[in-house]
Image: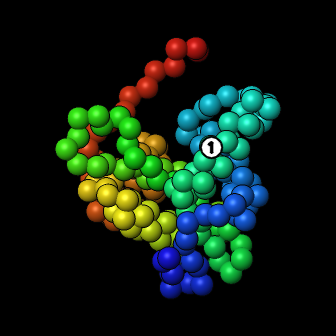
């Protein structure tokens, strides 16, 4: 567990955290909409998508691959990490940190840094020799944070909408 200079702690999520995580996850998706449109609000809130979100969160909790940041008992941030399944020929284990999100009122207080650092620790404990993360090109604040933590740009991901 990592503790910041504020009374904020970061730990592996448990099913006791599920309700708070699910609420935070929907706020994360809403924030991402401005950076990467993924469908209308109705589509995002559809029964099918709601079930996918539920299964994803449950699997990450069950696998011990989700972190929560709490201030006292309030959840103020979340983050996931997992093996990078796209590097089939790698000679070292590479893991990916994803979905780093902090409640707006708790930002700029070291919460994201604590989430990333604890994720790095968790990945290393599971055999990772390298961690990677992805950030939206327009998310300059997050990019600056990750670079300040020692992350370097190693690739570019390009996208094209096939359903304009």
Q: Nearer the viewer, residue 88 or 9?
A: 88
Residue 163 found in image quarter: top right
Element at label 1: helix
Q: Nearer the viewer, residue 46 or 141?
A: 46
Q: Nearer the viewer, residue 49 or 154?
A: 49
Residue 73 horizontal side relative to residue 134, left or right: right
Residue 65 horizontal side relative to residue 127, left or right: right
The correct choice, above or below, for 57 with respect to 123 in the image is above
The correct choice, above or below, for 92 with respect to 3 in the image is above
Give the x, y percent position of residue 127. 32, 58
Q: Quadrant of the C terminus?
A: top right
Give the x, y percent position of residue 18. 72, 58
Q: Residue at x 55, y 40 (%)?
A: 35
**How many numbered marks appear?**
1
Q: Residue furthest left?
A: 91
Other-residue count near label 1 (Cα within 10 Å), few / some / many at <14 / 14–19 / ≥20: few
Q: Which residue matches tag 1? A: 56
Residue 80 horizontal side relative to residue 56, left or right: left
Does residue 123 appear in this view?
yes
Give the x, y percent position of residue 159. 43, 26
The correct choice, above or below, for 73 with respect to 156 in the image is below
Colour option used: rainbow
Q: Residue at x 50, y 76 (%)?
A: 1
Residue 103 found in image quarter: bottom right
Q: Residue at x 40, y 47 (%)?
A: 83
The correct choice, above or below, for 2 with respect to 57 in the image is below
Residue 5 horizontal side relative to residue 18, left or right: left
Give the x, y percent position of residue 140. 43, 52
Does residue 101 appear in this view?
no
Residue 55 found in image quarter: top right
């Amino acid at each position: 567990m990592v503790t910041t200079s504020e009374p904020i702690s970061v730990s592996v999520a448990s099913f006791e955290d599920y309700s708070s995580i699910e609420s935070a996850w929907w706020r994360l998706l809403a924030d991402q909409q401005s950076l990467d449109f993924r469908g209308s609000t109705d589509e995002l809130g559809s029964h099918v998508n709601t079930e996918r979100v539920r299964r994803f969160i449950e699997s990450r909790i069950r696998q011990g691959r989700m972190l929560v940041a709490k201030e006292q008992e309030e959840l103020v941030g979340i983050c996931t990490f997992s093996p990078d399944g796209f590097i089939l020929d790698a000679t070292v284990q590479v893991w990916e940190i994803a979905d780093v999100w902090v409640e707006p009122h708790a930002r700029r207080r070291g919460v994201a840094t604590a989430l990333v650092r604890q994720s790095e620790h968790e990945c290393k404990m599971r055999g990772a020799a390298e961690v990677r993360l992805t950030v939206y090109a327009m998310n300059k604040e997050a990019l600056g944070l990750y670079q300040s933590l020692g992350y370097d740009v190693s690739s570019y991901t390009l996208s094209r909408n096939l359903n304009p």
